[in-house]
Image (tube, rainbow, N blue to C red):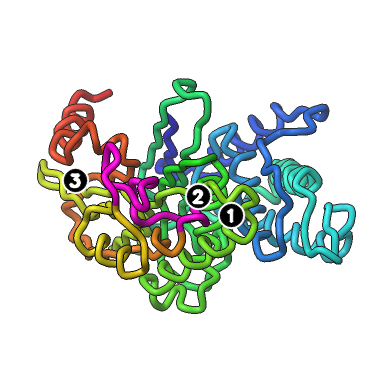
Amino acid sequence: MEMTMDVYDGDYLGAYRRFLEHFVANLSQDDQLPVRMTCREVRDCEITGAIADITLKHLNQRICPPSLQAYLVKLVREECTILFQKQPEECGYRPQEKKFSPLKLMQTVTNKVNAICQRYLDNSRLALLPPPPSTPLPLASSYAIKNRRRKMEDRSVILHDLHTMFSIKNDAVVNYYAVFDGHGGQEAATYCAAHLHQYLIESPHYPADPEIALRDAFYTTDSRFIECDETKNSGCTAVCALLYDKTLYIAWAGDSQAALIKNGRGINLTITHKPERPDEQSRIESLGGEVIFYGSWRVNGVLNVSRSLGDAKYKPFVSGEPEIKKIELDGTEDFLIVACDGFWERATEDIVASLLYEYVSSGN
């Protein structure tokens, strides 16, 4: 389990210094691959998400405080953009193709992260770091079963203070959580984890209308992944939660789900996209596809979900269009759970609620 907890005792500069000292002390000059990198080239349109993804992977090897994460990503993104303009080829950019070499890009970004962290160890610079948001960032944790399967095709994302991270001029405190359950390879889930939030904040409707922006983000992620997916086999279901001040937006495609836990009970927020769902079956058949029972109900006898991102071979029968739900929070909510179908197949919302309350009351 990985948990992100922000600074709550007021001594945020002390907490930031402790992280920076620990991070810098553990840097290895000989490590040419400090983070796992993508195997494919990065296009111009993907660079914002790629920089943030590499930066967060590098920082979170040492558990960076969430409010500091957001500001460091902002700095790295801004300084890398300037560097790309001044020394594009040294950063792995090929202007004719409008693509970055994945190795050189990763090394450029991680070197920039290292330099910024070393720079802010100076007391005069450390004092310039902004405090955490006045509204405390939520405590978040993620869990995945590792080493049980030959391949891990799922990804999860926790992004706190999205507006600081991507320089959105808006006073709202916005946090983003997502789970991408991959199939046919890890490529789709990996792409969505790095880029769906990028396309969200790049939508012309964000931040004025998060619902339309989320829909835009799913469409853009789906189409741009399909453009670059050489295998045409990979796909993933998606469930995203955007906590925008006191409003929660849930967007999903497929059978991953989200639930709110409040007053001792669990509330399911999603309806899974399965081929046997009457409206989904009607949509598929109207497009010329079939819903066939082969162990379970499947689109054209193959996929057992009717919506996903990627899965180029099964478009348009398998749609990337999300359903979106908007929930006004009243302050009585205790937990938000975002998980893949494997979790929900083994636990109902009320069972999860009972386990969570029992765990918290135990004082662990």
Q: Secondary structure at mark 3?
A: strand
Q: Residue at x 47, y 67 (%)?
A: 219
Residue 313 among magenta residues: yes
**Disc 1 residue crowd, few under 14, some 14–19, many 20+, Cα 10 Å:** many
Q: Residue at x 71, y 28 (%)?
A: 25
Q: Residue at x 64, y 37 (%)?
A: 20
- Whole-percent x, y for residue 1 in the image: 41, 28
As rendered, which of 229 and 181 lies closer to the eye? 229
Which span is picked out in magenta? Answer: 292-314
Can residue 173 be seen?
no
> Which kind of residue does numbered mark 1 sit on?
Tyr
Q: Is residue 300 shown left or right of residue 24?
A: left
Q: Which of the numbered marks, if any, corresponds to residue 67?
A: 2
> How much space separates mark 2 and mark 1, taking CA atoms?
7 Å
Can residue 92 be seen?
yes
> Which kind of residue does numbered mark 3 sit on?
Ile
Q: Which of the numbered marks, if any, corresponds to residue 71?
A: 1
Q: Which numbered mark, 3 or 2, is in the foreground of this view?
A: 3
- Whole-percent x, y for residue 126 in the image: 65, 48
Contact between marks 3 and 2 (CB within 8 A): the answer is no
**Disc 2 residue crowd, few under 14, some 14–19, many 20+, Cα 10 Å:** many
> Which kind of residue does numbered mark 2 sit on?
Ser
Q: Which numbered mark, 3 or 1, is in the foreground of this view?
A: 3
State which tag comes first along the sequence, 3 or 1.
1
State which tag comes first along the sequence, 3 or 2.
2
Q: Residue at x 44, y 39 (%)?
A: 4
As rendered, which of 271 and 124 lies closer to the eye? 271
Q: Which residue is mark 3?
A: 261
Contact between marks 2 and 1 (CB within 8 A): the answer is yes
Q: Which of the numbered marks, if any, corresponds to residue 37?
A: none
> How much space separates mark 3 and mark 1, taking CA atoms?
31 Å
- Whole-percent x, y for residue 284 in the image: 32, 63
